[in-house]
Image (cartoon, helix red, strand yellow):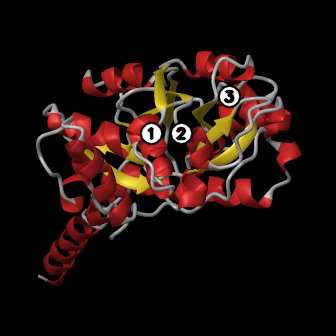
Amino acid sequence: MKKILFFIGMAVLLVLCAGCGKPEAANAPKELTELHVGVMPDTDSLPIIIAQEKGFFAAEGLKVDIQQFKSAMDRDSALQSGNLDGAVSDMLAVAFAKSGGFDVKVTSSTDGSYKLIAGKGENISRVQDLTGRDVAVSKNTIIEYVTDQVLASAQLSGESINKVVIPQIPTRLEMLQNGKLAAATLPEPMASIAVHNGCKYITGSDALGINPGVMLFTAKTVADKKAELAAFYRAYNKAVAYLNETDRNEYMDLVVAKGGFPPVAKEALVLPQYHEAALPKEKDVTDCIAWLQQKQLIKTAYTYQDLIVDVFQP
């Protein structure tokens, strides 16, 4: 009888031990799926490029497919066709997407910079000097929005200048440098290149304290890839620290090669002080929406809560 009880006890123990590993396996970390992210040749995108090239994404166990775009239109088409999970973008593009029925969410602000630059030899030292002059913009874009904000800061309106619509940024830069324009609003690195080549900085989004640049992801990505987004932003913040703390000579060749910048940017580009990922300021969002509505470009007065999602909360 004792032998029988012994063997029964051993059998029960073996069954219990066989199941010991199951809860641990069930709780094992899920393998992260790849993120497809669109970037533009601008300073906003550099933390993402650095995170990729310096292995910060890989250290988080995250694979990121970075896709380069020359135009916002191509970037937005890739988003809507499902080829991208997210992109470096701006508040106007977010509102246009939402208005068109495509649900995207802003997950953080970026460190983009847009500057009003006067042409070579122009007798322009302040915004008021541009009254009645030719100023190049791209219509109904973040460039025109910043231009109007700059004018408003000097008690001028969009009608105070002659807006010359030049969508292609390289063409805008070339015409400015060749004396065919009084001024132009340019993103970085093109603004720094213009100044490097003899043009004059007047003011810009940084000086006005406005920041319409954002990182966005599709609503589906936000819902389905929470762990991936958390890993993405941990790596992003490591890249921010690297950019802020490392001598630029150590990474400018990489920035030019991988960022899609012209070679002159290596010397000319003035990089911003980068910030760890955080939600946009509410005023940056509401001001963009108000401008779009004033120009009758969207019908709905989207609120901050309509467009922003906090992915930083555990």
In the rendered image, which residue does mark 2 sit on?
A: 131
Residue type of the residue flagged with mark 2: Thr
From where the camera sits, is residue 52 visible?
A: no
Q: Where does the image place residue 40, in percent across and percent down from the top left? A: 53, 30
User: Dots 3 and 1: beta carbons under 8 Å?
Assistant: no
Q: Where does the image place residue 147, in percent across and percent down from the top left? A: 48, 41
Q: Residues within 10 Å of mark 3 (few under 14, many from 20)?
A: some
Q: Upstream in the sequence, badge 2 or badge 3?
A: 2
Marks 3 and 1 sit apart, C-alpha to C-alpha, by 39 Å
Name the secondary structure under disc 3: helix
In the rendered image, which residue does mark 3 sit on?
A: 258
Q: Where does the image place residue 101, in percent across and percent down from the top left? A: 13, 33
Q: Which of 34 and 148 is in front in this view?
A: 148
User: Is 224 situated above or below 184?
Assistant: below
Marks 2 and 3 sit apart, C-alpha to C-alpha, by 39 Å
Q: Which mark is nearer the camera, 2 or 3?
A: 2
Q: Upstream in the sequence, badge 2 or badge 1?
A: 2
From where the camera sits, is residue 229 visible?
A: yes
User: Dots 2 and 3: beta carbons under 8 Å?
Assistant: no
Name the secondary structure under disc 1: helix
Q: How crowded is mark 1: few (under 14 residues within 10 Å), some or many (20 or more)?
A: some
Q: Quadrant of residue 139?
A: top left
Q: How crowded is mark 2: few (under 14 residues within 10 Å), some or many (20 or more)?
A: some
In the rendered image, which residue does mark 1 sit on?
A: 160
Residue type of the residue flagged with mark 3: Lys
User: Is 69 situated above or below 56?
Assistant: above
Instruction: Report the quarter where the N terminus lies.
Output: bottom left
Q: Nearer the viewer, residue 78 or 288?
A: 288
Residue type of the residue flagged with mark 1: Ser
The answer to whether residue 239 is left or right of residue 146 is right
